[in-house]
């Protein structure tokens, strides 16, 4: 049985993604704070930003969970196929009796 290739995120990509998220969140927060509007509008925008951030994390988790579940199903199917191929003997003669 061949093991699937493990996909690993490189450290550089992880750092880039984390920095990008941090900078964008900081920039949006600063923009909301210095926006020349009333407190209620600023509060609404801050709440909207919080909602976008939390829903982004939830979406990322759902995508990751779906990918992990399909990997597990794929590995189980591959194990079943490997077992069937290992048990199959193309040169076995069937005599008609119970085999």
Image (cartoon, grey):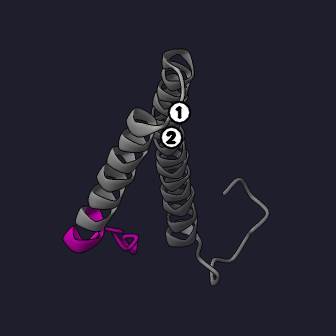
Q: Establish if 84 lies above or below 53.
A: below
- Examine the structure image and report whether residue 54 is included in the region drawn in magenta: no
- Taking the image as shown, residue 29 lies to the left or right of residue 79, namely left
- Local secondary structure at mark 2: helix
| Residue 97 percent location from the top left of the image | 74, 58
Which of the 4 quarters of the picture holds residue 44?
Answer: top right
Q: Is residue 78 above or below residue 5?
A: above
Residue at 74 percent of width and 69 percent of height: 95
Residue farthest to the right, as pictured: 96
Secondary element under disc 1, as helix, strand or loop, is helix
Dominant secondary structure (helix, strand or loop) of the stretch shown in magenta: loop
Measure how far apart labels 1 and 2 are at the Cα level: 4 Å
Report the quarter where the N terminus lies.
bottom left
49 or 2: nearer the viewer: 49
Q: Nearer the viewer, residue 32 or 20?
A: 32
Q: Are marks 1 and 2 in contact (CB under 8 Å)?
A: yes
Please give the name of the residue rendered at 46% of the width and 49% of the height, measured from the top-left corner: 68
- Identify the residue at the far top of this view: 40
**Quarter-wise, where is residue 74 in the image?**
bottom right
Mark number displayed over residue 65: none
Q: Label 1, on which residue? A: 55
Look at 48% across and 17% down and name the residue there.
39
Horizontal side of residue 19 vs 79, given as left or right = left
Which residues are the magenta region?
Answer: 1-14
Q: What residue would you read off at disc 2?
A: 56
């Amino acid at each position: 049985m061949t093991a699937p290739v493990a996909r690993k995120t490189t450290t550089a990509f992880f750092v880039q993604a984390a920095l990008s998220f941090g900078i964008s969140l900081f920039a949006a927060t600063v923009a909301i704070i210095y926006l020349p509007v009333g407190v209620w509008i600023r509060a609404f925008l801050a709440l909207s930003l919080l909602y976008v951030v939390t829903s982004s994390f939830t979406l990322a988790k759902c995508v990751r969970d779906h990918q992990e579940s399909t990997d597990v199903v794929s590995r189980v199917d591959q194990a079943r196929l490997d077992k069937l191929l290992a048990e199959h003997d193309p040169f076995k003669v069937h005599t008609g009796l119970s085999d």
